[in-house]
Amino acid sequence: MASVIHGFGLVFIALFAWITAIVRRLLLGPRLPSWSWTTELSVASARAVIAAAVRRPGDGTLTRFGMRFTAPVPGRLRSRMTVRRVRIAGMEADRYLPEPLADPQLTVIYFHGGGYVFGNPGTHRTLIAQLSDAAQVNVVAPRYRLAPEHRYPAAVDDAEHAYRALLDAGHDPRSIVLAGDSAGGGLAAALVVRISAVGLPVPGGLLLFSPYLDLTHASYTIRTNADTDYLPLSTMKAPNDSYAEPHQLADPEVSPLNADLAGFPPMLVFAGGAEMLLGDSLRFAERATESDADLTLIVEDEMMHVWPAFADWEPASKRAMDAAARWLDERRRTLKTDS
């Protein structure tokens, strides 16, 4: 009964946020000039629901929902996309096989977002399927362990095991691209730190959507962009001690913003100009410049956190998928040239 009550409570919160956003827009206009009605209402409801959820950190209903929910493959992709449940390094994973597959050698390991405490590969199926289709690339999305039950280094350990499994299966490391959104993007970057530390060969690239790179939450945009994003300011105002101990937060495996990027592979990073974690990506790009690392940063004006997943109807989302596909094609051509 409690689960039903909580569910109805979140629906009510979302509806109230919609009504408030509608009234505000009618009186004051769009919060940002480019935002459609759909985007404005979606951001408002997501902000309200997420804020309510973080006020109940021990809510088993939300935890079970995050562990079990699977979004559908977009209808336009179903005829040319196969998604299979597989196992990799003992973990459940989703494997995406588009038709046609441009190059069976190139494989993306994709880590889902969710603040290290929520979600599974299925919650991000729409985004991952769009990426797989746009780039015509094989994608493997492992179900890594989540905090607070499994705190650092569990997620990084799982990511390393997934990477090792592909290497053990005969994959050329240059044919593997690590990718992820939000915390999944941070985990992909943290995996490169781990790979360098243990002496494994680095992958062929790093593709990040709105990566969560600083768990001390020092980016000024957390506050300046709070009104145009859906992340909960109440949580982001303090360091993230649900994933790691306070003394671990500056560790590059926890906050990859502190990593030495000199040995990193080519990177493509997307950030929204209106998102709270914009500062993480901007500072990461600065560190890459200081280290002479190959990093391309694309900042999409007036877009929120992980907008390709959150607002796939936005033209900016298609631009991001197209840019990611072109960059992955460059990785594919580089692999063939080096071979």
Image: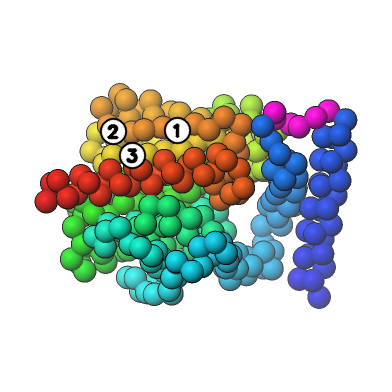
First of labels 1, 3 by sequence position: 3
Question: Which residues fall within the magenta stretch?
Answer: 28-33
Residue 311 placement (x, y as % from top left): 61, 47
The disc labelled 3 sits on which kind of residue? Met
Image-based side of 159 in relation to 181, left or right: left
Q: What label does residue 334 carry, if any?
A: none
Tell me if residue 137 is in the magenta stretch.
no
Near-viewer residue (245 or 283): 283
Quote the CA–CA distance across marks 1 and 3. 11 Å
Task: Let me know if residue 133 appears in the view.
Answer: yes
The chief SS type of the magenta part is loop
In x, y percent, where is residue 173? 21, 54
Q: Secondary structure at mark 2?
A: loop
What residue lies at 35% left-to-right and 28% top-to-bottom? 287
Tag nearer the camera, 1 or 3? 1
For residue 158, say whether it is visible. Answer: no
Which of the labelled discs sits on residue 294, or is there none?
2
* Depth check, front residue: 72 or 220: 72
- Looking at the image, is 221 positioned above or below residue 230? above
Identify which amino acid the numbered label 1 is placed on.
Answer: Ile
- Neighbourhood count class around disc 1 (C-alpha, 10 Å): few under 14, some 14–19, many 20 upward: some
* In this rendering, the label closer to the viewer, 1 or 2: 1
Query: How far is the residue under mark 3 from the one under mark 2?
Result: 6 Å
At 43% from the left and 70% from the top, the residue drawn is 82
Residue 30 belongs to magenta span = yes
The residue singled out by tag 1 in the image is: 298
Asked which secondary structure carries label 1, the reply is strand
The residue indicated by pointer 3 is 267
